[in-house]
Amino acid sequence: MISRDGDNPPGRRTPQQEVARLAELRAVHEAFAWFRANSRELEDLQLELTAVPSPPWGEAARAEWLRGRFEELDLAEVQMDDLGNVFGVLPGSDPNAPLVALSAHLDTVFPAGTPIQVSREGGKLYGPGISDNGAGLVALLAIARVLKETGIEHATPVVFIGNVGEEGEGDLRGMRHIFEQPRWADAIRTMVVVDGAGTDTVICEALGSRRYEITVRGSGGHSWSDFGIPNPVVALARIIDRFTQTTVPTNPKTTYNIGTVEGGTSVNSIPQSATMRVDTRSASVEQLDRLERALREAVQDGTAATSGKKKNGLTAEVRVIGDRPAAELPSESRLLKMIRAVDAQLNNSARLQRASTDANIPLSLGREAIAIGAGGSGGGAHTVNEWYDAAGRDLGLKRILLLTLALSGVPEE
Ligand SMILES: [Zn+2]
């Protein structure tokens, strides 16, 4: 009979064999037990952090809160950058090795002043942002805590990051800024983004999106006495009509949406301006480029057709208000093999998915990155009735822990 070791000498294990070895370490068993024994404490932590408001562009209070927790955990290099991203490093046995990063976004979608009430009712936690991304932030703290307490030896350092600006018009500014700082950009080779609840997906393709605000302006006037002056609302209607005749492929799936239209002052005024906001999405950069060209052409043609040869002609402005790069994790990447192996080890089934997350940024820079959930379940995301159910959280935490150890590397005992 041929032994396993004979087939795969140390250091040459398959990802599946490596993950199986890690899952059997005594310290890993201790960590798993810690997740179960401290579920109530993790819920309390989640309620506490959700009660700290973190509106878009106003994450400072929650960032301070997280920095405090990182300091309590005695992580190294605890710091906040000028945008409010918070960092803490758990050194590995090989201090010069590239970093494995675990990140979770700090921001919520709720504007400043939204009343934040958190509660625990019938086994569920309630509060705006409790799951997205309270669950992710708690996962980071739980992983840091067990790695510290069990003293599992791992090779490459792990950096824990709470970042700003993930949601909506934050436009991934926090993650962009992290990869503009040499300390992090040069050292982070692999990034695992923890966002929301669940264990059933691996987001490994970055859905790209570009968003535009188009404003058409004119002199405006009185509906009766100035009749005939070019009307910005009419120009916008023409632009929309032209642009929406653009065809898009189903594969790669590519979409567009006219989200908002505004303009004019009263029923008897020729408007001075009209504005619309357009969202385009695709996994393909070429398709996003193509849609952008079509939109700019439609703006030019629709404006010119409305202005005609008249003086008091219209002007149009196209402003890019969002740009999230499209990218994809190569199927032969180590990260993808490792998360597949971890899921097999834990009997967890997860679908590969495409979405727009913080992982877009490292992926677009050629780093290995995925986004996964923190375990448990959640609902009502982006509403004040958001909830989180911690049943099954420990599966999510086991998954993140095994993945982190597999990526970092654990020396033979
Ligand atoms: Zn989120």
Image: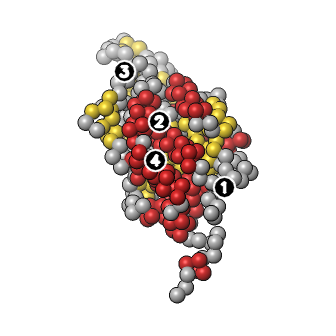
Residue placed under numbered mark 4 in the picture: 34
Front: mark 4 or 1: 4
* Amino acid type of the residue tagged 2 in the rendering: Glu
Residue placed under numbered mark 1 in the picture: 155
Q: Residue at x 45, y 24 (%)?
A: 53
Image height of 218 relative to 197, above or below: above
Q: Disc 2, disc 1: CB below 8 Å?
A: no
Q: Residue at x 45, y 25 (%)?
A: 52
Left or right side of 119 for 232: right
User: Mark 3 Cα within 10 Å, few/some/many (few <14, many 20+)?
Assistant: few
What separation in Å lies between label 3 and label 4 (alpha carbons)? 34 Å
Residue placed under numbered mark 3 in the picture: 115
* Amino acid type of the residue tagged 3 in the rendering: Pro
Q: Earlier in the sequence, mark 4 or mark 1?
A: 4
Where does residue 89 sit, x and y in percent of width and height?
A: 64, 42
Q: Earlier in the sequence, mark 3 or mark 1?
A: 3
* Amino acid type of the residue tagged 4 in the rendering: Trp
